[in-house]
């Protein structure tokens, strides 16, 4: 009973994904107004040759701040999970 | 590991670490930046941990020093974000005529190093953070799994 | 309906996500479930980057670029963040698997379901 319900719901989800892939915009012509402005004015406003770096650090700096927080939290959690073993082997 | 792996590691490691630092520093001219260069550097450290024993690497590279490096990278990033608070948060206040303040000419040009305001300093801060973070993760997990094998 | 009939990258990504969902739901080994999650994250990152492709466009960097038409730079910046988040999640899940193996002695998903006191 559980196995057939699982397989039926998986098939429905995969069919929905493939139908959506047919209904999207043609590959290679994306609608873009914000990116045209960024490509035109990135050299004079941010002063960098690399447009992707200026988007990551200047136009969208808040996202990079959130990502740095996530990396810091993950490293703290991994180092904390493996800490007790050294006290047991010393004792 | 065997003698061949140790010899090749001894020859290759300085080049891998130097390439990682090059990708971090030239993040505003060529493709790359803080995250990519930090990942290359951390994979060089992972090569050292695999080729030699993880206990030998831990004698030279303790986790306390890695934690200090990561925290200083995070503080430098936040400090640079707050320094432009006169106009707004995360303002690029060095685009003028300071140390990093040239403006490159329009269109295609060979890259100039002293451009792009506060972006190279942010690249260095994020690069330090990623180097210390990924090296700490790989080192701690290698030490934990070697303890399991010794106790059984 | 017929304007998107040649979207081969989008159909391939739908197949990739379908494979990873099948792995995560059906398999019982914990490490295989983590592998399914890694394939799912790779498929989603691929989808975000392929949304921003312009036909005949160049790399969005002004150093020695041969033409003016460029691909969109914003999806590449969002994918950078997504890759780092994926690495953090995989590292945390693998260290939890090591702790589960230490406490219960097996990596079967059915044997570590009951909460013990």
Image: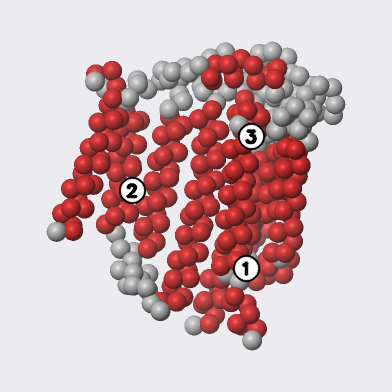
Chain letter belonging to callout 3: A
Both marks 2 and 1 on one chain: no
Dividing the image into 4 quarters, which one contains the C terminus of chain C?
A: bottom left
Rendered image coloring scheme: secondary structure
In front: mark 2 or mark 3?
3
Q: Residue at x 55, y 26 (%)?
A: C73
In front: mark 2 or mark 1?
2
| Front residue (pair B8, B14) | B14
In the rendered image, which residue does mark 1 sit on? Answer: B54
Percent x, y of residue C88: 53, 52
Is residue B44 at all visible to an observer of this figure? no
Alpha carbon distance from label 3 to label 1: 37 Å
Mark 2 and 3 residues: CB-CB less than 8 Å, in contact?
no
The numbered disc on residue A61 is 3
Up/down of B120 relative to C95, above or below: above
Callout 2: few (<14), some (14-19), or many (20+) C-alpha neighbours within 10 Å?
many
Mark 1 element type: helix
Chain letter belonging to callout 1: B
Alpha carbon distance from label 2 to label 3: 32 Å
> Which quadrant holds residue C4?
top left
Is residue B6 at all visible to an observer of this figure? yes
Q: Residue at x 67, y 54 (%)?
A: B132
Q: In this image, B37 relative to C50: left or right? A: right
Mark 2 element type: helix
Percent x, y of residue B1: 58, 67
Percent x, y of residue C91: 51, 57
| Front residue (pair C51, B48) | C51
In the rendered image, which residue does mark 2 sit on? Answer: C20
Q: Residue at x 70, y 33 (%)?
A: B89
Q: Residue at x 56, y 76 (%)?
A: B147
Callout 1: few (<14), some (14-19), or many (20+) C-alpha neighbours within 10 Å?
many
Q: Which residue is situated farthest in the right direction here?
A: B98
């Amino acid at each position: 009973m559980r196995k057939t319900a699982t397989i039926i719901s998986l098939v429905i989800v995969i069919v929905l994904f493939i139908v959506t892939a047919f209904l999207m915009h043609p590959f290679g012509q994306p609608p873009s107004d914000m990116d045209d402005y960024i490509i035109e004015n990135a050299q004079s406003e941010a002063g960098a040759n690399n447009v992707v770096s200026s988007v990551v650090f200047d136009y969208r700096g808040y996202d990079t701040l959130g990502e740095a927080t996530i990396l810091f939290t993950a490293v703290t959690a991994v180092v904390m999970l493996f800490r007790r073993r050294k006290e047991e082997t010393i004792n | 590991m065997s003698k061949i792996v140790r010899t090749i590691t001894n020859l290759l490691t300085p080049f891998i670490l130097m390439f990682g630092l090059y990708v971090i520093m030239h993040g505003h001219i060529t493709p790359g930046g803080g995250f990519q260069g930090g990942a290359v550097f951390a994979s060089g450290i992972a090569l050292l941990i695999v080729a030699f024993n993880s206990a030998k690497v831990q004698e030279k590279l303790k986790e306390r020093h890695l934690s200090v490096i990561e925290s200083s990278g995070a503080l430098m990033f936040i400090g640079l974000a707050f320094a432009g608070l006169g106009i707004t948060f995360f303002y690029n206040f060095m685009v003028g005529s300071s140390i990093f303040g040239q403006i490159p000419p329009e269109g295609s040009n060979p890259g100039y190093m002293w451009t792009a305001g506060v972006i190279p300093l942010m690249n260095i801060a994020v690069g330090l953070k990623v180097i210390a973070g990924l090296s700490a993760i790989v080192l701690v997990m290698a030490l934990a799994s070697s303890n399991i094998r010794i106790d059984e | 309906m017929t304007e998107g009939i040649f979207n081969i990258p989008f159909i391939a990504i739908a197949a990739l996500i379908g494979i990873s969902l099948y792995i995560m739901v059906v398999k019982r080994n914990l490490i295989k479930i983590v592998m399914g999650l890694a394939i799912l994250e790779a498929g989603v990152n691929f989808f975000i980057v392929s949304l921003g492709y312009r036909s005949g466009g160049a790399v969005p960097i002004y150093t020695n670029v041969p033409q003016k038409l460029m691909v969109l730079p914003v999806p590449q910046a969002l994918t950078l963040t997504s890759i780092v988040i994926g690495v953090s999640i995989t590292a945390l899940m693998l260290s939890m698997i090591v702790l589960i193996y230490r406490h219960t002695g097996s990596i079967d998903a059915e044997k570590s379901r009951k909460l013990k006191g």
